Image: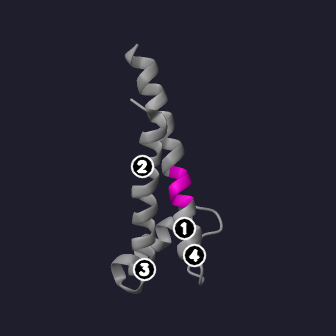
Amino acid sequence: MDPRALGLSAGIIWGAAVAFLELAAGTRYGERWRLLLADLYPGYSHEPGDLVWGTILGFIDAFVLGYLFGRIYNWLSK
C-alpha cells in the first residue's frame, strides 16, 4: 500500500467534506457539523473565510492519518 497515495486520497475526500459542510452550514444540519469542526480544529469558527481554512485543516488532518495508517499497515503486513 502506498502511504502517500492513501494520505492524499483521504485528505482530498475529507477536505471536500469539510468544504461541503461549511457551505451547508446555513441549514440546521450543516450548523451542527460546523460546531463540531470548530471543536476539532483550532482557529476554525463561523467567520467569513473559514471555508478555505477548514478545508486546509481537514486535508492536513486526513492526510496525516491516512499516511500513518498506510505506514503502520505496511509495517504490520511484513
* Residue 70 point in image, percent of width and height: 44, 32
Q: Which of marks 1 and 2 is nearer the N terminus?
A: 2
Please state the extent of the stretch shown in magenta in the rendering.
Answer: 57-61
Which amino acid type is shown beneath numbered disc 1?
Answer: Gly
- Left or right: residue 28 compared with residue 61: left
Q: Distance between the residues labelled 1 and 3?
A: 11 Å
Question: What residue is shown with label 4?
Answer: 50
Q: Mark 1 points at which residue?
A: 54
Residue type of the residue flagged with mark 4:
Asp
In the rendered view, tell whether residue 71 sits above or below residue 34: above
Identity of the residue furthest to the right in this view: 43
Q: Where is residue 59 in the image (x, y as percent from the top left)?
A: 51, 56
Q: Tag 4's secondary structure?
A: helix
Q: Mark 2 points at which residue?
A: 10
Q: Kindly report the distance in space between the C-alpha atoms of the residues bearing marks 4 and 2.
A: 20 Å
Label pair 4/1, CB-CB below 8 angstroms: yes
Q: Distance between the residues labelled 1 and 2?
A: 15 Å
* Disc with the residue nearer the chain's start (4 vs 2): 2
Q: What element carries label 3?
A: helix
Residue behind mark 3: 23
User: Reading the chain from its start, which is encountered first: label 3 or label 4?
Assistant: 3
